[in-house]
Image (cartoon, rainbow, N blue to C red):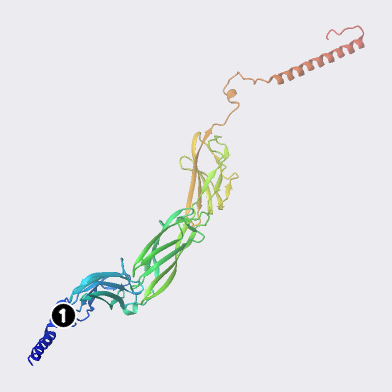
Amino acid sequence: MKIIKPVIAVLTAVLMLLSVGLPAFAEEEGYGYSSSILTPHLVAEGFSADKAVYNGTAFNLTFKLKNTSSDVDVRNVLIRLSGGEAFAVNGGTDTVYADRIAKGGTASFSKAFVCADNAPAGMNAISASVSYEYFEGEEKFSASEEFTFSVKVNQLETSAPSNNQNLTPQLLISKFSFGGAEVNGGEVFSLSFTVKNNSSSIKVQNVIVKLSGGEAFVVADGTDTVSVDSIGAKGAATITKAFKCQNNIPSGIYPISASISYEYFDGGEKASGSADLVMSIPTAQPDRVSFEGITLADQKVTQGQENDCGFQIINSGQTRLSNCKVVLVDDNNTVIASAYIGNIEAGTQFSSNYTLPVTFNSLGEKQVVLVLEYENEDGEKKSTQTDFQLTVEEEFNPFEDIENGEDDIVTPTASPIKVAVISIAALLGTVAAIIIIVKVVKKKKAGKGSVIDEEI
């Protein structure tokens, strides 16, 4: 019995030590480990955009994550964001990172996005995939979470009347100019026109303008196509292009056409449109007419003697000259001759045939103007002229010296050949006369014997 009682006391002490001392020891030696620690989680505490979100606009999304654990920090927090088809990350990567979110703590994150042009109006999702790590004692654990942020996409001009929001946008030319009232043949000019979007709520994009001048005009620089990125609702864009008017077209009004194609989004759906617009340009061919071959230019004429003022009119332009009249005017602006010559077709000439007979009665140098008066193809009265000079002299009188009582008459000197011919002729005449006289004398002697006619 004496042995049993000490053994029982020892066993009792051991049991008390096991039931009381061992848990305290394990807690002390286990570095704070307790089977009562809950697994940490990250939850979204809220999010917001820094501005109202519209198609094509940029914004910043800010959101918060809370560590639900009151005992354990979460580490190595990696967040990957995706906006689907509605939103795209606006620069940089799609990832944000935090080294630690303390137990029971909250961390704030931000990322820049841009709303797609074709994003439908209403709520669109941005998703977040979060991975992180934590420790229980010395053991490392990994976990992940998924979140979705619903961001509202607003329709442009939501305050506009609902019955106008879905009207198809139309493009019109509101005004145009080309540097004057008309364009001359062969001239290069700048065409400027304004394209207006008549929609009050929808902008148009990817606007392509193809220009054509038809038979009258050609593009003078670059290509015939102009592009415009976008034209806002009720907005306008001005387009300028250089053209050249053809040399050979008659005067008139000719078109320049603008074929326009464009795209737009209506209720999140992409659509396309087109327009064929025409601008009318008046053209005029300049008159190209001139005088040539004026026969009296720089000539001397006799006082009181009629002369023909011959000339030619060259119409080298592309227009017809109608009801043409030529007028000769002296230096006192007095009409001294005129004539109606009719029409002169384009590319032809008129040659006079004693059209302007004229007589000058006063002596001296004369400044004379030859004028062509005509009507162009628009019925406008026009004229062109050329100046020239002539000299009027007195009429020559071959008997003037005799009439003035002068006795010395100058005999024109004959040429040596003429003198020789005359001399030979005179000599032959003399010889012939001598021969005739000799024959007459012989006859008389033969008829009277030796009697000599003393008269001979």
Residue at which label 1 appears = 26
Instruction: In the rendered view, tell whether residue 184 sits above or below residue 357.
Output: below
Height in image: 157 above or below 193? below
- Residue for point 10% across, 88% down: 7
Q: Taking 55 as reference, is 329 left or right?
A: right
Relative side of 370 to 149, left or right: right
Residue furthest front in the image: 2
Instruction: Name the image quarter holding residue 352.
Output: top right
Q: Could you say which is closer to the camera, residue 329 or residue 289?
A: 289
| Circle 1 residues within 10 Å: few <14, some 14–19, many ≥20 | few
User: 38 or 92, which is in the foreground?
Assistant: 38
Lateral position of residue 98 relative to residue 402, left or right: left
Residue in view at x 41 percent, y 69 percent = 262
User: Is residue 158 in sight in this rendering?
Assistant: no
Q: Position of residue 19 (x, y in %)?
A: 13, 86
Amino acid type at image mark 1: Ala
Q: Position of residue 192 (x, y in %)?
A: 40, 60
Residue at the image position 49 percent from the left and 34 percent from the top: 365
Residue 341 can be seen, yes or no: yes
Q: Secondary structure at mark 1?
A: helix
Q: Which residue occupies the extreme bottom position in the image?
A: 1
Determine the image quadrant of residue 309: top right
Task: Between residue 44 and residue 227, name the one nearer to us.
Answer: 44
Q: Does residue 73 appear left or right of residue 445 in this picture?
A: left
Where is residue 261 drawn, in percent x and y? 43, 68
297 up-or-down from 259: above or below: above
Query: Against 406, is 167 above or below?
Result: below
Q: Nearer the viewer, residue 407 or 450?
A: 407
Q: In x, y percent, where is residue 387?
A: 49, 41
